[in-house]
Amino acid sequence: MKEICLRVKSTSYLNWGFKTSESIEMWDDVTEFNDKKGRTIELRMINQDIEAFYQGQRIGGFVFNEIEEEYGFYQMVINMHLEDLPGFKHCGIGGAIVRWAEEYWGWPVVFGKDDGMQSDDGSHLTGDGPWFAEAIYRKHSLSNKSN
């Protein structure tokens, strides 16, 4: 069963005394881990996407598209970025997002093609994307060989 989490940013009181939220953040699930620099990173599952936060500030996240094929389901990464705060790239956050996504949904995460073009599904790899996708595929290949 999924747990629904609510975090109230601020509250105000109506004239008759009831509290009402001015701004509410909602997410489906949350987990934490320590990155390569020892910082506690919070990952939030929001609908089909996962966003990363450090001390309440958004680092970035991955946008996923659920794909169903005749042989099963997978999560396609449509967009990934971890540049909202400086100093968080290459610290294990992207890998943690992929691991949690696969654990959460129970099927693999895949990436678009590295051909410089946007695919029909909206995915494309730019910047560190091709390097990151290759590193994830390489790790999966090694872990599957050891099983």
Image (spheres, grey):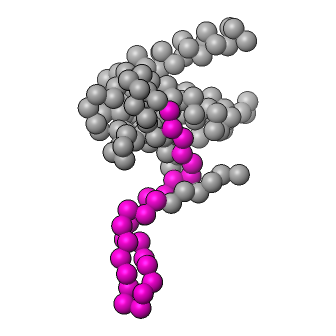
Q: Residue lying farthest front?
A: 38
Q: Is residue 50 magenta?
A: no
Residue 44 visible in the snapshot: yes
In the image, is residue 80 above or below residue 5?
A: above
Q: Which residue is drawn at 30% across and 33% down?
A: 83
Q: Residue at x 56, y 52 (%)?
A: 28
Q: Split into 4 quadrants, where in the image is the C terminus?
A: top right
Where does the image place residue 119, in percent across and percent down from the top left? Answer: 45, 32
Span highlighted in magenta in the image: 7-33
Judging depth in this view, the residue of 54 and 49 nearest the camera is 54
Main SS of the magenta part reads strand
Judging depth in this view, the residue of 9 and 103 nearest the camera is 9
Judging depth in this view, the residue of 25 and 74 nearest the camera is 25
Where does the image place residue 15, in percent across and percent down from the top left? Answer: 36, 90
Q: Residue at x 43, y 36 (%)?
A: 41
Q: Residue lying farthest bottom?
A: 16
Q: Residue at x 62, y 28 (%)?
A: 108
Where does the image place residue 118, in percent across and percent down from the top left? Answer: 40, 32
Tell me which corner region of the image, top left, top right, bottom left or bottom right, holds residue 87: top left
Q: Does the magenta stretch include residue 16?
A: yes
